[in-house]
Image (cartoon, rainbow, N blue to C red):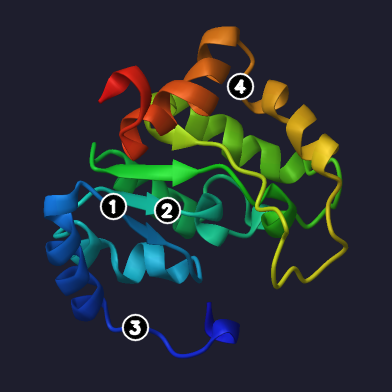
Amino acid sequence: MGHLGRHTPIEDVLALAARIAPLGWHLQIHGDPALLTDLAPALRRSPTPVVIDHIGRIDAALGLNQPDFQALLMLMADERFWVKVSGMDRITRLGPPYADAQAFARTLVAEFGNRVLWGNDWPHPNHGGPIPDEWQLVDLIAEIAPSQAVREALLMHNPQRLYQFGDNQ
């Protein structure tokens, strides 16, 4: 994100990825949604899994067919990519209960349920709007992951696999 300071060149990020790959770690990408399009070819060269944070920071007002979300979907077609469905409060243009943002999270959970993670972004650093109600964000889990099995994947099984803890090591 530009407001957080200078951008790290992608080749430096990939060099770091090569160093952390033997540790079983992953890259986490957080930035302007144009990164999904502009950096997709480079990100596909990552030797580690890549987690896209905050639904790619896409603009919910631009709809599901927008180029940035379509770029995210194309990245997610690669099994090495994961996405966090945190930040609905950051991509919304309607505000709570984030109905415009829920469609993106629901789509990602439905299409890539085995590589989606949930988070609430507490304590919401650098938030441009009012700080969201944590309980409201928790209540939205049932909206974006309608079945018990999907919620268990989102909240338990997927993090276990990605972070290599619990019985899924």
**Which residue is at the front of the view, 22 or 134?**
22
Ranked by sequence position, the earlier of labels 2 and 3 is 3
In the rendered view, tell whether residue 2 sits above or below residue 153. below
Q: What residue lies at 48% left-to-right and 51% top-to-bottom? A: 69
- Percent x, y for residue 72? 40, 50
The residue lying furthest to the bottom in this view is 6
Of the numbered discs in the image, which one, if any, rests on residue 8?
3
Q: Is residue 134 left or right of residue 142?
A: right
Residues under numbered marks 1 and 3 in contact, where contact means CB atoms less than 8 Å apart: no
Viewer-side label of 4, 3: 3
Task: List the residue tagged with mark 2.
Answer: 52
Q: CA distance from mark 1 to mark 2?
A: 11 Å
> In this orientation, does residue 49 appear?
yes
Residues under numbered marks 2 and 3 in contact, where contact means CB atoms less than 8 Å apart: no
Viewer-side label of 1, 4: 1
Q: Amino acid at mark 2?
A: Ile
Task: List the residue tagged with mark 1.
Answer: 26
Q: What residue lies at 27% left-to-right and 62% top-to-bottom? A: 40
- Assess disc 1: are there few (<14), some (14-19) or many (≥20) residues with their C-alpha within 10 Å of its C-alpha: many
- Percent x, y for residue 23? 18, 51
Q: What residue lies at 64% left-to-right and 56% top-to-bottom? A: 62
Task: List the residue tagged with mark 4.
Answer: 145
Q: CA distance from mark 4 to mark 3?
A: 34 Å
- Assess disc 2: are there few (<14), some (14-19) or many (≥20) residues with their C-alpha within 10 Å of its C-alpha: many
- Percent x, y for residue 139? 79, 28
Ranked by sequence position, the earlier of labels 4 and 3 is 3
Q: Amino acid at mark 3?
A: Thr
- Assess disc 4: are there few (<14), some (14-19) or many (≥20) residues with their C-alpha within 10 Å of its C-alpha: many
Q: What residue lies at 54% left-to-right and 84% top-to-bottom? A: 2
> In this orientation, does residue 112 appear?
no
Q: Which type of secondary structure does the marked residue at label 1 adopt?
A: loop
The residue lying furthest to the top in this view is 148
